[in-house]
Amino acid sequence: MELYTTVLTLTVVLSTDAIFVHEDFAIGICSNTEAERMFGFDEEELWHADFNQKRGVETLPDFGDPITFPGLYEYSVRNTEICRSNLALWTKTFKSPPPEMDAPQTSIYPKDDVQLSVQNTLICHVTGFYPPSLSISWTKNNVNVTEGMSLSQYRPRNDGTFNIFSTLKVTPVEGDIYSCTVNHRALQGQPQTKTWDVDVAFPSVGPAVFCGVGLTLGLLGVAMGTFFLVKGNNCN
């Protein structure tokens, strides 16, 4: 059964003299196996429903004024049930028309500068895909890993497609190879995989060697010049 997505946007004008435009948005996604409900303001997430933990998650920064959303999780559960009911009805009515699809684009990179044996975070950024339904898996040296992995909510883009982030806690060791694999219907059964290998650049010893050799030859030249100058004075 296909996913059903709703993006509601409310534009608020705060002043008529100097126009400041802000946007509230809400995202609802459902299928037989997936569900998401998120609210935000000016492209920033304020709250989302964690259906696995059965609770609402407030994502305001620590320095923001405390805001609570009482009853919003229960509302999200009811909304998801209505979404799935409507989805089943519309699928039957419209005979499951093939959805428009956009294939994802994937990149992988470390969060911080890489230092051997120092814990870091790998980020797998998947963007530009539609509909918002995909899976992400990680491997280390061709072995599947799940410990230390996290997955963000689906994030909407202005063009109607979506972003999502997956992270993996790693401790870099020289020679290790990590990969992030994405499965999406638009890829038509050909998963998209990006790899990242631990390759820490060490400072080159070449310049130091050349400087050392040059300094040695220079001092040797000065010593030889002084020696011949003294000999010449003695001859005179």
Image (cartoon, rainbow, N blue to C red):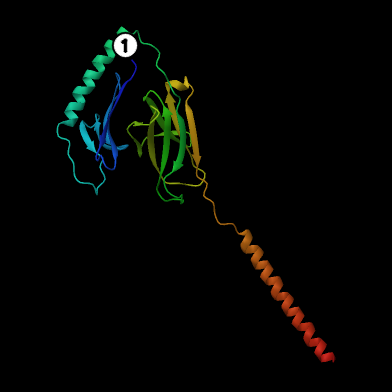
Q: Which residue is at a point 65% across and 67% down the rendered structure image?
A: 212
Q: Is residue 30 above or below residue 155?
A: above
Q: To which quarter of the image does residue 152 belong?
A: top left
From the top left corner, tell me how far across and down residue 31 is, in percent.
30, 20
Residue count near mark 1 (Cα–Cα under 10 Å), binned few <14, some 14–19, many ≥20: few
Disc 1 is placed on an element classified as helix
Q: Quadrant of the C terminus?
A: bottom right
Q: Is residue 66 above or below residue 88?
A: below
Q: Is residue 207 above or below residue 143?
A: below
Q: Residue furthest left?
A: 70
**Front in this rendered view, residue 140 or 37:** 37
Q: Is residue 107 above or below residue 233?
A: above
Q: Is residue 55 left or right of residue 184?
A: left
Q: Which residue is at a point 30% across and 7% down the rendered structure image?
A: 93
**Front in this rendered view, residue 187 or 162:** 162
Q: Which residue is at a point 40% across and 30% down the rendered structure image?
A: 136
Mark 1: amino acid: Thr
Q: Residue furthest front?
A: 17
Q: To which quarter of the image does residue 209 belong?
A: bottom right
Q: Is residue 177 left or right of residue 150?
A: right
From the top left corner, tell me how far across and down residue 164 is, in percent.
38, 33
Q: Which residue is mark 1?
A: 91
Q: Which residue is at a point 56% across and 57% down the rendered structure image?
A: 203
**Front in this rendered view, residue 75 or 14:** 14
From the top left corner, tell me how far across and down residue 74 is, in percent.
17, 28
Q: Quadrant of the N terminus?
A: top left
